[in-house]
Image (tube, rainbow, N blue to C red):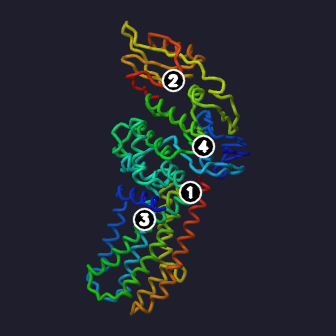
Amino acid sequence: MLHCEAVCKRYSAGQWILSDVDMTVSAGDVVAVVGTNGSGKSTLLKILAGLSQPTSGTVSGRPPTVGYVPDRFTAHERISAVSYLTHMGRIRGMSTAAARSRGGELLERLALVGGPTASLRTLSKGNAQKVALAQALLVRPGLLVLDEPWSGLDASAHGVLGDFIDEVAGQGGAVVFTDHREAITGTHATSAYAITDGRVVRRGGGHTEGPAPMVELTLTAPAAGAVPAQLDWYALPGVVDAARRGQGIVLRVTREHSDTVLMTALRNRWSVDAVARASHDRGSPTDARSVAP
Amino acid sequence: MISLVRYMFTVLLLSQRYLAPLLLFTGLTAVLTSSDTGPLAATYSAVAGVMLLCSAWLTIALIGLEDPAHRAIVVVTAGGHRRVLLGSVAAAAAWCLLLTAAGLALPMVFGSHTVRPVDLALGTEAQLISAFTGMAIGLVCSRLVFRRQGYALVAALVLLLAALLAKGVSPVNIMLTDLQHATDSADVLGSTGVLVAAAVLLLAVGTAVTHVITVRKS
């Protein structure tokens, strides 16, 4: 379907951001693009979505309907979330009623705080990200391009996002997303590409070899009264999900990295309440609130 | 395309950034045409001069409203940079048509004139020449071309001055000279119509230049 051949990109006379990228995305694929900050992931996604032209090389077979979610959706507009989605739906050719009802339905699934009539400028980063996600799914996309979609979303929205990805792929669409956490890409993607120094290399996928084994770590504050340090759990290797449960934290970590994460937690004065093999559904623990990454 | 224009029109309306150019237009028109009893051709040439400034300002405001991430979403949703740029041009034109209507009516309110249809036709032509030229300047000085607002402001001022003062080259300058010396609107209606076509051409060139630069920068 979507095929990139010898794609190179640089801005003006600057250094090459992408060089000789060959990539194929077929219908039903969920492709992860992994790389460090500034490695060129967003540039590659913009080229795939048709936003940016490659300096050399060709991109062919892009489906007519593309959904794109940028990495940052800073909203200054006074327009309400549902009006914004209605406008976007109309631009995509939907009727006003259909766009409004589809927008409302998506915002309900994503549990937008403040409701569909909240003005975009009043939304927090995570809630604005939910609106950005909703606009990409107003009509069924043939290609869904997501730039770091998990960042800023709360734990329950993580599950909904996973469902959206599965739905698009199940209906014959292709999904390409980026994330710098390999644990997440391992859980959701059927294949993965890694970007280093502008070069893109194909890696083995997640689902194709079976999902990575997961461990659920339940951490609490020690009874002795020591105050554990607040950590950016998502920055640790292998952490897929971090949710607050009462005074404690429940982490879902790949088995490969669970020892390292446990060691880090103990060093930061956390006490271990339970360690268990986690199931693979993406649902978050009930009554859990997300821990902002 | 209508849905795209509707979205851009609404965003500008809700942002209230249209208010400053609108007030400037009304204020300057009031100052330039109050207690005026002379021929309407000269009156409308003054209004057209104000339109040049305000149409450029409105176009810059309209395009600068959305940050790059929002515009990227609109580009993917609408199916390309070209469609979104044409949508911006159409939305700016819709705002300028509102100003044109105001520009035709306000001199009647502030001064005393005997109006004939030919005067209104000439007034519309004069304001459209300025509106299209101003929009072309607004496009090439917008955020799509200039990332830094200071440079954009300087470029816009230089181009606006050139449009007003370039004798025999700028459609706006030729129109202003013709209208100020016209004793009857009917005498210059035809030649001003040709200048409207020249202004449309200028707008097309401005749009094409902006499109090429936008695609190169993206």
Q: Position of residue B107 (x, y in %)?
A: 30, 80
Sequence-wise, which precedes: disc 4 or disc 2?
Answer: 4
Relative height, residue A269 to residue A235 (above, below): above
Q: Mark 4 points at which residue?
A: A45
Examine the rendering and report whether any part of residue A220 can be seen. yes
Q: Quadrant of residue B47?
A: bottom left
How many numbered circles does the render carry?
4
What chain does mark 1 sit on? Answer: B
Q: Which of marks 1 and 3 is in front?
A: 1
Q: Quadrant of residue B28?
A: bottom left
Residues under labels 4 and 2: Cα distance? 27 Å
Q: Which of marks 1 and 2 is in front?
A: 2
- Residue furthest to the top: A224
Kindly identify the amino acid type of the residue bearing the numbered disc 4. Answer: Leu
Nearest the eye: A189 or B210: A189
Q: Name the residue under label 3.
A: B57
Kindly identify the amino acid type of the residue bearing the numbered disc 1. Answer: His
Residues under labels 4 and 1: Cα distance? 16 Å
Residue appearing at x 43%, y 40% in the figure = A106
Q: Residues within 10 Å of mark 2 (few under 14, many from 20)?
A: few
Residues under labels 1 and 2: Cα distance? 40 Å
Q: Residues within 10 Å of mark 3 (few under 14, many from 20)?
A: many
| Relative horizontal placement of residue B24, taking residue A92 as reference (left or right) | left
Residues under labels 3 and 2: Cα distance? 54 Å
Q: Mark 2 points at which residue?
A: A281
Look at the numbered disc 1 and give the secondary structure of its residue: helix
What chain does mark 3 sit on? Answer: B
Q: Are marks 4 and 2 on the same chain?
A: yes
